[in-house]
Amino acid sequence: MYKKLAFILFLAFLLGVLLYLKPFERPKKELEKIETFLPKADLAGRVYLLDFLNESTDLMLFNEISQRQFLTSEFVLSLAKKLGLDVQNPVYVFANERGDAGTVVPLYTTQKLKGALDRISLENNVKDTILGQDRIYHLTDYQVHIFHRDHFLFIYYGDYFFEIYDEFIANKKREIAGVWKGLFSNPIFPNENLVLYTESEALKQFGMDHAYMAHDSDSSGFHLKSCIKINDSIPFFVKDSGRAIKFSARSKRTIDLHMNTADLSAPVKSLLIEKLSLLTSKISFPIADFIDIWSGDFCFEEGGFYLVSEKYIETELDDNFEPTQVEKTRYKNVPRYSLMFTVNEPANQLLDKLLAKGILTKEEEQYRFLFSPQLKLSLRDDQVFFYSTINPPRNYVSSKNRIEWTYKGTDFEFQVDSLSNKRVFGSIEVPMKKILESIAFL
């Protein structure tokens, strides 16, 4: 009796040690294998798909997406299991400025995937090609290439598949590309469900080294928190408030920035002038003269129209067919533009230089910036105003640092939350209306 009890206790002890040393949990996929197949790209991303869908539930419910039942984590997980996709591990996405993009999905089995690929081949114009050990499925109508290995599924959209395949798939001396190393070493958003990373040339030409973005959503839209790393240290700090102008609700592009420029040292000022000169090199804007007098507040507004009336003289024939001049009134829409910046000394010298360079032209009592509409000029103490409306825009104290910009019909909003040494933290908002237009098939 005691021997049996002692033996049972001994087995229980061994089982406890085994559970402690090697607990029974779902074995983790060797993601290092997948990482070495990820191609170099301008934009790299990692998505925890199921958690991302759970986080987006309120967004889909509020906007009444008709087929949202197919975008739940439960449905996607069940579908993934039928296909052998491992969506409990991260899914990787990539894109390039040249227009191609793709995704790499982990697999826990390939046995269930063959039937799905055969069905795709039957229902679409598909050409399949054998490259080495891989069968490549090419959906010719959609510029899509698909293939898989034992542990991942590779889906690519674009015109450069074979270039990518030769360089990153067929090459046996593979190593993790630098852009993916940057993503995996992410110190800014380590626990977010969707993280994007870029170190593209489009950033570098403006003095930026790389940028991280992470998803955050509510019922109104899709938000990306961002952190931009600057190559050179420009110790700009956001002011809590500053002078600003009231924007029209119809304005499509607005800038409302308030920076602390009072304590810039000579080396930092030179560095700032150098970086901003890159942005204005095409028109040779006198950045140095602007920085010398700028006190940190800058507001710009474009968008909408207002109706104005103007009198003109027209020659008509009277009843006796004699020419006579008649005064008439006509109405026209004038584009709405406003520009305001604060200065620490008079801006006359800057304005004279702009006129001399032809960046600013004067027509009677009004001015034009290159191809802008005619603008009135108002100088008030420490503020310079250009405006196309009848009266100057209203002036007030703003506590925001924000840029709203319409690009190709899409409204974007970037808000600067803080600036620290070599890092800019902010957020970008993409309106839900644009997202719904992009996924109208749902």
Image (cartoon, rainbow, N blue to C red):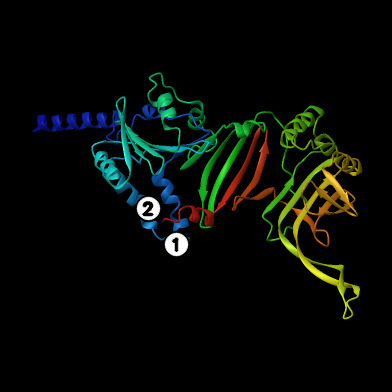
**Please, which residue is most extreme toward the top here?**
173
Residue type, label 1: Glu
- In this rendering, the count of numbered labels is 2
Q: Position of residue 239 (x, y in %)?
A: 74, 44
Dot 2, crowdedness within 10 Å: few (<14), some or many (≥20)?
some
Counting residues from the start of the chain, the first of labels 1 and 2 encountered is 1
For label 1, the residue is 64
| Residue 118 shows in the view | yes
Residue type, label 2: Thr
Viewer-closest of 122 and 83? 122
Q: Where is residue 12 in the image (x, y as percent from the top left)?
A: 20, 33
**Please, which residue is most extreme toward the front here?**
321
Q: Is mark 1 on a helix, strand or loop?
A: loop
Q: What element carries label 2?
A: loop
Quarter of the view holding residue 135: top left
Dot 1, crowdedness within 10 Å: few (<14), some or many (≥20)?
few
Q: Is residue 96 above or below residue 59?
A: above
Image check: 110 left or right of 227?
left
Distance in Å between CA atoms under marks 1 and 2: 14 Å
Q: Nearer the viewer, mark 1 or mark 2?
A: 1
Viewer-closest of 134 and 404? 134
**Please, which residue is most extreme toward the left here?**
1
Dot label at residue 226: none
Q: Where is residue 166 in the image (x, y as percent from the top left)?
A: 41, 25
Image check: 144 left or right of 207?
left
Quadrant of the drawing holding the N terminus: top left
Circle 1/circle 2 CB separation < 8 Å: no
Residue at figure coordinates x 84%, y 42% from the top left: 358
Residue at figure coordinates x 39%, y 44% from the top left: 141
Quarter of the view holding residue 273: top right
Residue at figure coordinates x 26%, y 29% from the top left: 17
Dot label at residue 72: 2
